[in-house]
Image (cartoon, coloured by chain):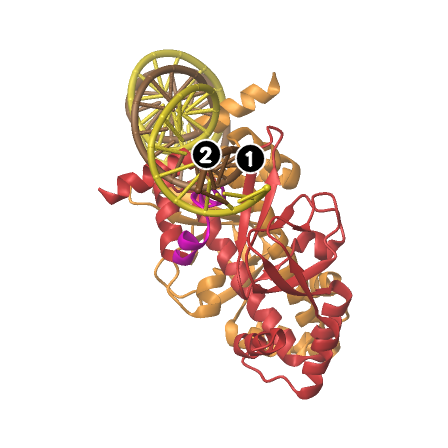
Chain colours: A orange, B red, C brown, D yellow
DNA sequence: GTATTTTCTTGATTTAGCTCATCACTTTGA
DNA sequence: TCAAAGTGATGAGCTAAATCAAGAAAATAC
């Protein structure tokens, strides 16, 4: 299946609506395939995030670097997710985040202006956007609860929500994503096995 | 100004679009004013959150209670904010949250089915919904970073983002919202004054 | 207007999770 | 191919924040 076929399927599945031939042509004309090698940046801190990418293949991390030079991962993204810093993308402000490919990464990307067009002219696209917004809002509400969770609870939450992350990402990445030191995560796993 | 005038202003301001007379009639017909006294519940854990409310006056807390009986505040809501558990509201699942009035609370409330109608028929409403989704996504992205913040950093973040919260809510509420014990918050404030 | 509940402060103690350090094991790359 | 980098485990010690306890101050209720 080509890049676009999978993308079209995704839109139709999420939105519950069909894409017309015209819709598909419009999307094909304005979403550009882009490949990044492992460790290449999709976005660098300080830049405005001009693009939003639909991940066809591969994975990426969104992270900040603190004064001590430590990395903090905010988001781990895989196939069929959207890749961007929403704040920078919507508001055209310089981003505080970095987005880096963790594996060979293939995305279909476009700009904010074009997204606005799709929303106006493609009903399935706009329905998809609403569904994703809902999902985002719900996910945010959930992750917010993590503030009060212990290290172990955060890990178990991850195991039940995103079990495939464990196969896909190194323990260091997972620890950073959970806001834990990698030593602590190592001990937690040992503890759970007992 | 009546309940509804302020509400209409809000919609027009956020969406950047005008409401027609018909729009206003539709909204007036389907948003019901509701008053809650201090400590009354807008939503109780285990119930499906049937309503979404626009806060005209007053404030509320959204919280969970853990096994030890401790309260954890997830959200503090004031005038011109929307009050609901989005997960329960959108998905019609029993809520894990409680929402309780902290002051005499006046809302304009409606149901999911009616919101769908407004989204379909009132362009300003649907534009507003998109803007709010964007804001939500951005706010969630920001609050997510708090995982790696120290107690003091979380507090300072709050001071700069929501300074009015400090006047409005007790220190206990603020502490719970930040995921800190109230003793810790007390010490932090003392520390900062020096 | 006084009793009662709630809020805030401060001290002493405990603890979860971080930091630092070391070692073994695996993967990557020139 | 073998050096370098990355990954994961484990121990020792440290520290930020929680818990427990008690009293002062403020707000609320009768």
Dominant secondary structure, magenta = helix
Residue B149 on image: x %, y %: 39, 42
In the rendered image, residues at marks 2 and 1 fall on the same chain:
yes
Residue A18 higher or lower than A103, as above or below: below
Residue A180: give its label. Answer: 2
- Give the camera-side residue of B62 and D20: D20
Is B106 situated above or below B185? below
Q: Could you tell me if residue A101 is visible in this image?
A: no
Q: Chain of mark 2?
A: A
Dot 2 or dot 1: first in sequence order is: 1
Quadrant of residue B7 within the rendered picture = bottom right
**Which of the two residues, B176 or A149, is positioned nearer the viewer here?**
B176
At 49% from the left edge and 57% from the top edge, which residue is drawn? B139
Instruction: Tally the marks.
Output: 2
The secondary element bearing badge 1 is classed as helix
* Residues under numbered marks 2 and 1 in contact, where contact means CB atoms less than 8 Å apart: yes
Query: In the image, residue B75 lies at what x, y percent?
Result: 54, 50
Label drawn at residue A154: 1
- In the displayed orientation, state which residue is furthest to the left: B194
Q: Is residue B38 magenta?
A: no
Residue drawn at the location 59% of the way across and 36% of the way down:
A166
The foreground one among A151 and B189 is B189
| Residue plotted at (60% across, 56% down) | A137
Q: Is residue B187 above or below residue A139?
A: above
| Residue B193 disc label | none
Q: Nearer the viewer, residue A66 or A153?
A: A153
Residue range of the region highlighted in magenta in the rendering: B163-178
């Amino acid at each position: 299946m080509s890049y676009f076929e999978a993308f079209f399927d995704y839109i139709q599945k999420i939105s519950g609506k069909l894409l017309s031939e015209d819709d598909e042509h419009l999307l094909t004309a304005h979403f550009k395939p882009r490949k990044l090698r492992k460790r290449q940046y999709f976005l660098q801190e300080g830049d405005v995030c001009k693009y939003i990418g639909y991940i066809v293949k591969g994975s990426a991390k969104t992270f900040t670097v603190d004064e001590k030079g430590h990395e903090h991962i905010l988001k781990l993204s895989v196939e069929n997710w959207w890749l961007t810093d929403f704040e920078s993308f919507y508001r055209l402000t310089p981003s505080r985040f970095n987005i880096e490919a963790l594996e060979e990464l293939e995305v279909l990307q476009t700009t904010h202006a074009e997204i606005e067009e799709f929303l106006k002219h493609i009903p399935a696209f706009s329905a998809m956007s609403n569904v994703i917004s809902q999902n985002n809002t719900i996910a945010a509400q959930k992750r917010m609860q993590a503030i009060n969770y212990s290290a172990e609870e955060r890990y178990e939450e991850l195991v039940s929500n995103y079990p495939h992350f464990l196969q896909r990402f190194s323990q260091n990445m997972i620890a950073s994503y959970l806001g834990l030191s990698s030593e602590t995560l190592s001990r937690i796993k040992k503890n759970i096995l007992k």
